């Protein structure tokens, strides 16, 4: 018997990008474990990915090409050969492309974060075709944009340094569920005497374990940051030298922050003025004592109208108190901007050859699939090619998304590992390999290591990597540019730009052997300033924002839907709903893994006793959650974890695995954030009522 260890990387949309060791016995993967030598993984994988072998060999894998035989959404398919599948796709796409290739739309996101299986051969194909471009906004572009205006790029505090911080603000994130290896560092900091504060409307698993929890109203973080600035300035808890040398616009900021008294801030955020003052004092005084103060800014703050501004305001705080002077101080939103990834080489935008193609925002897929041709919109979408994504479950305003994918005149191809909600709408469903079956190179958005993924096993059944599918489609379409011949290994070898100082050590052959390689970066990236902004400074005042039609100074942008901002709507729909990630799922991935779904149980709605009582809702009752966009049902958990006025439905469930065939995205809207054209999932007012019990479940309170 032959037993080998293969070095792999976790492909999932998670900041931790773990280094994995796969045990392979006679060609069969039998176990995965975290690489004990990789500093951030430290030998630990999360519960979800510990089940990766179970997921890979699941009897539910899509392993053959299939053609739909039932109605769209019904999930009835017949098996066909690869040749039939590819011929049919090419025959359907060719006449559309002849009329106008922009009627063809790719829809993809981060099912895999790999630079090769993500967007390389796929975009070469779509660029050559001249298809519509997809604006990949569904997750991070609001905060990314706000951070970029202020700091210049997605570069921040190194995850490995947080353990030396004396104060950590965990702001809009639940790392126990979604950034486990950062949480391990925060725990170490706690053991070394640090104070941890969670800022989150919900008492998440993480908030429960912090020293303090500030439960503000959703979408009000930009106000809290302004209130903190007010106190820091009023009480002179500032690093004047750092401000003078490395920031721009302090005098204007001072005027703006003066408007945000602790009382006004408290009123906006739904917390007490004392909480605002104490938080700012602790932050400023700890820094004044020469100790590192750090902020882990996460995605929860970005999913309301003012999501971009929230991150912008928060990213001004470290410069005010000089926190960047310490390796363990500063802020981390994402580290992805540290990596010199060779995107243009992998994706070849030059294949567009000067053609101007339109861009469709993935967040508004619900509306866009239903649009007729028009001068502003361009041609009606006639074909969608879905890969690395599950739009039916994850996109907002789901009823519209569903209506779009139900269109009889829409040709849909889905490349998938499983029969997801989206796969059920495919005309042609193609089997995709998992991370154990293909090669990839990865960057991370929570640490600073370039990562390699070797294929551990041969593809199961007839599954193929995304790259191979697009190579075959390119050949069918008659694209003969040499770049369509490149192998996955050749693509991986191009992943990073080794002429860049940070990646001079990049060499695919040695990365494959070792599995990981840290970027060449200073421990404290902005200790001496050098921000990658136009001015080279941390920009409290941003002329770029002004040019883009935004307030050049930190500001408060109220949610679209909140009791304060829209009292009229709140009369009908008085509760704010958020739907952050459930611990055992990764977006909608893993929902079909039986052991993980069993741990989550079924869709739940957390609701405060004050809100449950007047609705006659008891713990364990089925609740119906609704607004003008739609409704879904979930089992009520009456708990003080949700602050009064807030309901929480941990997500993202597969619709078809919920009792009513729906999920939280029935009620979320397609409205976009202030910057970055991103979704506003957590900017949603709803009403909740007791639902009729499901047949056979009349009596199940517990
Ligand atoms: N287990 C697991 N891990 C994941 C994912 C997953 O689905 N499951 N998803 C991955 C992806 S794609 C991403 S983008 C990241 C997300 O990473 P995080 O942003 O850390 O995600 P969450 O764990 O949802 O943490 C968000 C927290 O923000 C809170 N929140 C909601 N609205 C607000 C608000 O207005 N203000 C503040 N301050 N807090 C708010 C929520 O209650 C929640 O506790 O996680 C990644 N990791
Ligand atoms: N209500 C609500 N909605 C949300 C969010 C929320 O917090 N609340 N979070 C949002 C966020 S942050 C994000 S990032 C999006 C995530 O949205 P998506 O990126 O669509 O994430 P997943 O639902 O995990 O779907 C990824 C799919 O890719 C498939 N896949 C994985 N690897 C491969 C591969 O190599 N090839 C192919 N062809 N397929 C592969 C997986 O099987 C999976 O079905 O959801 C967003 N939607
Ligand atoms: S999902 Fe995140 S924590 Fe889990 S193994 Fe992958 S990178 Fe690590
Ligand atoms: Mo995300």
Image (tube, rainbow, N blue to C red):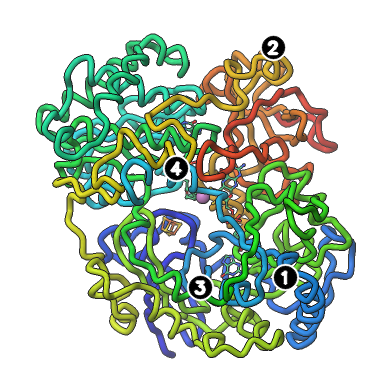
Q: Which residue is mark 1?
A: 101
Q: Secondary structure at mark 3?
A: helix
Q: Is residue 621 left or right of residue 500?
A: right
Using the image, tell me which numbered label, if any, was put on residue 347.
Answer: 3
- Residue found 72% across the figure and 59% down from its top: 422
Upstream in sequence: badge 2 or badge 3: 3
What residue did someone put label 2 on? 614
Residue that numbered label 4 is attached to:
143
Circle 4 packing at 10 Å, graded few (<14), some (14-19), many (20+), is: many
Of residue 361 and residue 301, the one placed in the foreground of this image is: 361
Query: Mark 1 and mark 3: span between their CA atoms?
Result: 18 Å
What is the CA distance from the residue labelled 2 to the residue labelled 3? 55 Å
Q: Are marks 2 and 3 in contact (CB under 8 Å)?
A: no
Secondary structure of residue under mark 1 = helix
Give residue 277's quadrant in the image: top left
Q: Is residue 554 visible?
A: yes
Q: Does label 2 or label 4 sit earlier along the sequence?
A: 4
Q: Is residue 30 left or right of residue 611?
A: left
Asked if the beta carbon under badge 3 is closer than 8 A to the nearest atom of ligand 2, the reply is no
Q: Which badge, 2 or 1, is on the more N-terminal residue?
A: 1
Indicate which label's residue lies in the foreground, 2 or 4: 4
Residue at 36% across, 14% down: 259
User: Tag 2's secondary structure?
Assistant: helix
């Amino acid at each position: 018997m032959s037993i080998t260890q293969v070095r792999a990387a976790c492909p999932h949309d998670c900041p931790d990008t773990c280094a994995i060791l796969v045990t392979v016995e006679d060609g069969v993967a039998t176990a995965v474990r975290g690489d004990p030598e990789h500093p951030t993984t430290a030998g630990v994988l999360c519960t979800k990915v510990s089940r990766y072998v179970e997921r890979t060999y699941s009897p539910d894998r899509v392993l053959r090409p299939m053609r739909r035989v039932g109605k769209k959404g019904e999930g009835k398919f017949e098996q066909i050969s690869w040749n039939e599948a590819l011929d049919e796709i090419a025959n359907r796409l060719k006449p559309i492309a002849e009329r106008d290739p922009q009627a063809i739309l790719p829809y993809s996101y981060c099912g895999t974060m790999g630079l090769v299986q993500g967007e390389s051969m796929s975009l070469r194909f779509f660029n050559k075709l001249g298809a519509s471009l997809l604006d990949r906004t569904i997750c991070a572009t609001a905060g990314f944009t706000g951070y970029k205006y202020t700091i210049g790029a997605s570069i921040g505090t190194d995850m490995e340094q947080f353990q030396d911080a004396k104060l950590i603000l965990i702001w809009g994130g639940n790392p126990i569920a979604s950034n486990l290896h950062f949480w391990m560092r925060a725990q170490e900091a706690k053991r070394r005497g640090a104070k941890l504060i969670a800022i989150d409307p919900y008492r998440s698993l993480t908030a429960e374990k912090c020293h303090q929890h500030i439960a503000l109203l959703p979408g009000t973080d930009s106000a809290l940051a302004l209130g903190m600035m007010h106190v820091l300035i009023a009480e002179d808890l500032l690093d004047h030298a750092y401000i003078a040398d490395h920031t721009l616009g302090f005098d204007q900021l001072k005027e703006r922050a003066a408007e945000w008294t602790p009382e006004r801030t408290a009123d906006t955020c739904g917390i007490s003025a004392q909480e605002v003052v104490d938080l700012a004092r602790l932050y400023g005084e700890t820094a004044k004592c020469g100790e590192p103060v750090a902020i882990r800014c996460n995605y929860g703050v970005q999913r309301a109208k003012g999501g971009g501004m929230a991150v912008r305001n928060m990213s001004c705080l470290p410069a005010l108190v000089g926190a960047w002077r310490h390796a363990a101080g500063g802020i981390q939103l994402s580290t992805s901007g540290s990596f010199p990834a060779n995107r243009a080489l992998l994706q070849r935008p030059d294949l567009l050859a000067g053609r101007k193609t339109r861009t469709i925002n993935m967040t508004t897929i619900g509306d866009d699939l239903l649009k007729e041709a028009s001068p502003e919109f361009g041609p009606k979408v006639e074909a969608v090619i879905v890969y690395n994504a599950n739009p039916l479950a994850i996109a907002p305003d789901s009823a519209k998304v569903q209506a779009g994918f139900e269109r009889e005149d829409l040709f849909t191809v889905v490349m998938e590992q499983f029969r997801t909600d989206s796969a059920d709408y495919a005309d042609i469903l193609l089997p995709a390999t998992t991370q154990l079956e293909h090669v990839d190179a990865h960057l991370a958005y929570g640490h600073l290591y370039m990562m390699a993924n070797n294929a551990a096993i041969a593809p199961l059944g007839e599954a193929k990597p995304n790259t191979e599918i697009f190579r075959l489609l390119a050949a069918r379409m008659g694209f003969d540019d040499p770049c369509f011949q490149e192998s996955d290994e050749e693509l991986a070898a191009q992943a990073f730009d080794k002429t860049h100082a940070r990646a001079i050590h990049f060499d695919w052959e040695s990365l494959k052997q070792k599995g990981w390689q840290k970027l060449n970066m200073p421990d404290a990236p902005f200790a001496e300033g050098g921000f990658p902004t136009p001015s080279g400074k941390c920009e409290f005042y941003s002329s770029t924002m002004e040019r883009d039609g935004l307030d050049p100074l930190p500001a408060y942008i109220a949610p679209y839907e909140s009791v304060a901002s829209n009292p009229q709507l709140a009369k009908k729909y008085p509760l704010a709903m958020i739907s952050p990630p459930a611990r055992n799922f990764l977006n909608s991935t893993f929902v079909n893994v039986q052991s993980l779904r069993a741990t989550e149980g079924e869709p739940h709605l957390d609701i405060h006793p004050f809100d449950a009582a007047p609705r006659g809702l008891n713990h364990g009752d089925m609740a119906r959650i609704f607004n003008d966009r739609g409704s879904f049902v979930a089992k009520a958990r009456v708990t003080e974890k949700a602050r009064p006025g807030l309901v929480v439905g941990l997500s993202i469930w597969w619709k078809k695995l919920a009792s009513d065939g729906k999920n939280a995205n029935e009620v979320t809207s397609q409205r976009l954030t202030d910057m970055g054209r991103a979704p506003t999932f957590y900017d949603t007012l709803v009403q909740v009522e007791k639902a009729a019990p499901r047949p056979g479940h009349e009596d199940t309170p517990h």
